Image (cartoon, coloured by chain):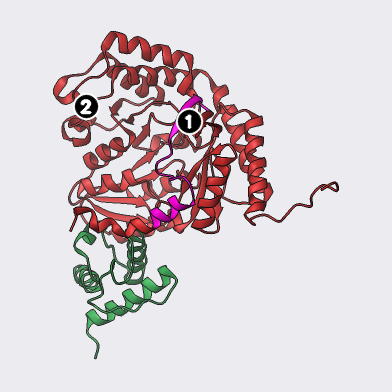
Chain colours: A red, B green
Amino acid sequence: MGLLDKHLGYRAPLDAIRAVGADPSNVRFDAVLSPTEGMLNGQKVILLGTNNYLGLTFDEACIEASAAAVRQWGTGTTGSRFANGTFAGHLALEQGLAKFYDRKHAMVFTTGYQANLGVISGLVGRGDHLILDADSHASIYDGARLSHSEVIRFRHNDPEDLYKRLKRLGDQPGGRLIVVEGIYSMMGDVAPLKEIVEVKREMGAYLLVDEAHSMGVLGDRGRGLAEAAGVEADVDFIVGTFSKSLGSVGGFVVSDEKDFDLLRIVSRPYMFTASLPPAVVASTLTALKRLEEDSDLRRRLDANARQLFHGLRALGFQMGPQASPIAAVVMPDQATAVGMWNALMANGVYLNLAVPPATPENRSLLRSSVSAAHTPEQIEKVISVFAQLGQDFGLLPKQARQASA
Amino acid sequence: MESVTDLTVRQIGRTAGIVMQRPVEVTAASDIGRDLGVDSLTLMNIVMELEDVFELSIPLDRLADVETVGDLAALINELRARA
């Protein structure tokens, strides 16, 4: 008996998806031409599943900063900051983030996943209570496990349910930390943060907001949902990532919490992993400056998001509740989703196939993420491909053909 | 007369049926994953419903030791006794 036998239940579904065409967990790009175009199987495709919200992956200034840093500081740090020391770039990035968010403290992690692991497990421990939105990202659930705290889920985006579950804890001892996300990564819906803050204040809990998909997207200055909702003073910790709007990799937390520096000596996902390489730090810091200085990026992103969301919804597809850079088209079942996803790629549109259990309510989704770098023509092309395939797959009513047909 | 555990087991079956939108036959010995076909996310959703049914907090970290419906019933009864 092999050690992997316990996972054999996944074999048949995986083979079934592969039998239809490409394997969504193993898409191989021959080349990436720009933030919005790549080559797949020798064919040019529009990239619509990259989380590259501001389109900064090919930004000239970011590339130059990255190249200069790799020449000056080398390819890697070869160790953790806890053991091997900090480079000037790490400090500059933390200072830049603290200033951007107008917070006293910032701390950088090697990935966004590790930021949630490291922050959550550092803030709550055995005997504390962690209250999570039911649709939280896997990194939040894994951080919860690492923390050994008592974990309670509340119904997605439901402040009354949050209130009920906090109240149910009664006068049990231990701290209380609520964790929500700015924009939820699957359906693109936004947390009702004002109402959640009211519950937090009444019940005396701490609040952490993961702005992974909302940094650079929401708020006048691009700080995320807390800024857009006008409740930044009530958000105790903001976690985010560099791998979306900032176009690199890494994660962070900012806060005004006292004794924040202790996190650096208790947070294992921070202490026991190599720190970010200088090239990544340099492009991230430059991208942060671009985000701060060029609000036009956000305007273009918003216009593109609206064009795609309203375009697809007008065709008759079932969508998430609101326009955001994440536009999820709900498919009737997994087989249709897999078929559509392959057909979209064959027609020059790459996006994400999302199937249970990674999705809310066991839905099968075609998940797209829009970029400020998309042109209106690219979005229009995507909508027209969806229109045609929607008819081919019987998801949309057949349009009457032109009289000549 | 049914024991407290039997009643809890029956309630778990009812709640699992509501969450999974199909009839679910359970006994205390039913393995939640193997026999009922409940994945980890569905189990968390069943537990969230059970918290409302029993007006009780069931921390997810306690589910690590739960394999059977009987295990879950025992956990719920322990938490009820403590409340």
Identify the residue position indicated by label 2 in the image.
A274
Q: Which residue is mark 1?
A: A52
Q: Position of residue A390 (x, y in %)?
A: 64, 51
Tell me the kind of residue under disc 2.
Ala
Any mark on residue B49, and which? none
**A45 lies left or right of A263:** right
A209 is higher (above) or lower (below) than A317: above
Is any part of residue A192 visible from this angle? no
Tell me the subunit letter for badge 1. Answer: A
Q: Is residue B21 magenta?
A: no
Q: Residues within 10 Å of mark 1 (few under 14, many from 20)?
A: many
Camera-side residue of A24 and A122: A24
Q: Is residue A175 left or right of residue A10?
A: left
What percent of the width, then of the height, locates residue A208?
A: 35, 41
Quadrant of residue A206 within the rendered picture: top left
Q: Would you say residue A144 is visible in this rendering?
A: yes
Marks 2 and 1 share the same chain: yes
Q: Residue at x 47, y 34 (%)?
A: A50
**Region of the chain picked out in magenta, as a range:** A13-36
Seen at 22% across and 35% down, the residue is: A269
Kindly report the distance in space between the C-alpha atoms of the residues bearing marks 2 and 1: 25 Å
